[in-house]
Image (spheres, rainbow, N blue to C red):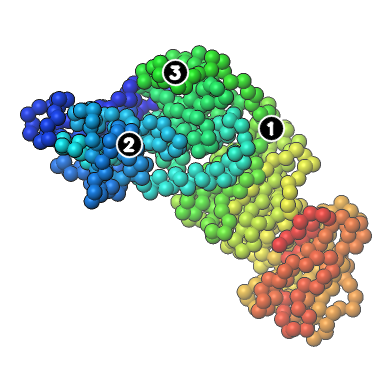
Amino acid sequence: MKIIKRRKVIDVISVVLLTIYLVSNISLNISHAKTSDESGIIIDYNPNYYDSYDEFIGDDSAHFNYDEGNILSEGSSNLEEIVPNFNTIDEAGAYLRACMVDRSGEVEFIFSNQEGYSGAEGFAAIKSATFVETDSPKEGDYLYWNYAGLQGSFDMLEEGIKYILKPSYLSTAGQEDEIDEKVNSLLCNEFAGWESMDEFSRIKMAYKWVTYNFTFVGGSDRHSTYSGIIEYETVCQGFSSTMYRLLREMGISCRVISNEAHGWNIVKIGDYYYNIDATWDVKTKESKWSNFLLSNSSFELGEMHTRGARYTTEEFNLSYPMSNQDYQWIPEEEQLGVEYKTHIQTTGWQDWKIDGATSGTTGKSKRLEAIKIHLTGTEYKDIDLEYMSHIQSVGWEADWKASDSVSGTEGKSKRLEAIKIKLIGKDAKDYDIYYRVHVQTFGWLGWAKNGECAGTTGMSKRLEGIEITVLPKGEAPEGMIGYSYIAYGKTALLDENNQKEICYNAHVQTYGWQKPLSDGSISGTFGEGKRLEAFKISLEDVAYDGGVAYRSYIAGNGWESDWKYDEAISGTTGQGKALDAVQIKLYGQAEEEYDIYYRVHIQTYGWLDWVKNGDIAGLEGKGKRVEAIQIVLIPKNLPGPK
């Protein structure tokens, strides 16, 4: 693998390359110019990305505009009414550094020049001080690898050298704000608890996140940290500068190392540094990493990992002593897991999520439009998965999608409404795949498993989030099991894959008896002003003796005197009488093993709260008709619907 830079490969030595033109055009060399009337134009470029100032100026992707010597930077100006004056190189470098971190487009200052530098020599020294390593993760190598170059001028004055410098960058101030937000999100979520981790665990966690999420795009000009941490498509500079930023944020000493073809990192554990190269381990699972925490003797295989000259000096080696042995660590056992990512309205593809984490959003009214899923830890197992989605105006996809395939649509603004996921292969019998979805209006539904439907059909409700996990047979995730799929009685699409524990159907004004539904689906109507006149219920796939009893409060009649049992009709037909309230309960062994939850949609009020085990759902004697009902069985001691 060869990493190609913007137009040529990275320079071995990151030196200050300075092209200076005398305003008088009498000479190109002003190394001895010290008189007060001498001045010059400075053009500096980062040799990691450009080979000449013409190439630098001609690059439209650098964040500046150049027109006949006038630089109109996209950054803000730091020109001040009183020009700051600095006595030392370090002070001037610190000022320029702070301005560049803020992505300032124009910086003016005076360096007192007690050393008697020429304009070129002074700038070279100040630039060197600008990119020193500091305590800030946004300075040092991070700043240097996101710096494109600068143009400006100097004037030799009696009080020193006056510089007006106009830097350009590989990222804008706005993009840096996005990076800051992303870094903070990672530290609080994916990397939560990093403060209590040891150095190894922090490094491994960041390395795993980068190698799992990034894609290497060789031959491109995607060098910036932004192209990596935000866009996930980058070259080695994006990998290494992202690793530097993340690890420095977590208190790990880290440097970016390069040669003329490639860039990587060194990281410190204990007293010594080790090599890591996330670019070469991209999309590789942990047990197969071959570029993680290696000594130089293991790492320098061929020219790709031979250090550039600036990283082999005695000073550098003393500052960053390398271990003479690889770091000894044991990869985590590859347990079966699942990774998934979703395509979200206005956002596009989100990061990969792992083993029960939420993919998508909640509380933002953003539809899921597509999904990709694959298993991990399958090297010694005969197991895979397939999945399909129910899509707005399309319905269920015709075929099951294979691992890592796109289920859903991109660029068509069509919502996912439901999903089914199943395991396949000889070892599938030893595992269950559970999944649950966050649905518009309903929120989180319960867990479905092994090809059951999760979501809704017939109601035009979008999926907004999803969680997926794989567990050994017999284990179950925390939370509500069941009530994972809601069909609408008027347009019900029944699915034979779903286990049917409790079935019911309603007699509705005008429509008569609807199709039988099960396990939380909506029997009846809403938004049409149609009364529920009767219903019947039965237990189906329940491995316990017993059954279900129920009765209705009938408009004009009151409560039925007798409870109805197991498929008997509660209510009336042909009399035009509404149900105002219902009670439902279990009996026998089923009562000991399950709670029965139910709720009704009431005229004027809409959906009322869930009740259970014989409580009243509805309004007695208020003249408010029941229009729809949902019923679900939940095993004892597990959470019910909310």
In three-dimensional space, the C-alpha distance between marks 1 and 2, rounded to whole angstroms, equals 54 Å
- Residue 91 circle label: 2
Is 257 rendered above or below residue 371?
above
Q: Is residue 416 visible?
A: no
- Picture coordinates of residue 401, whole percent (x, y): 59, 42
Determine which residue is flagged by label 1: 335
Tell me if 211 is positioned left or right of 144 in this view. Answer: right
Displayed quadrant of residue 552: bottom right
Mark 3 or 1, nearer chain start: 3
Q: Residue at x 83, y 82 (%)?
A: 558
Q: Residue at x 29, y 42 (%)?
A: 63
Determine which residue is flagged by label 3: 317
- Residue in the foreground of this view, choosing between 381 and 451: 381
- Residue in the foreground of this view, choosing between 582 and 139: 139
Displayed quadrant of residue 219: top left
Mark 3 or 2, nearer chain start: 2
Displayed quadrant of residue 490: bottom right
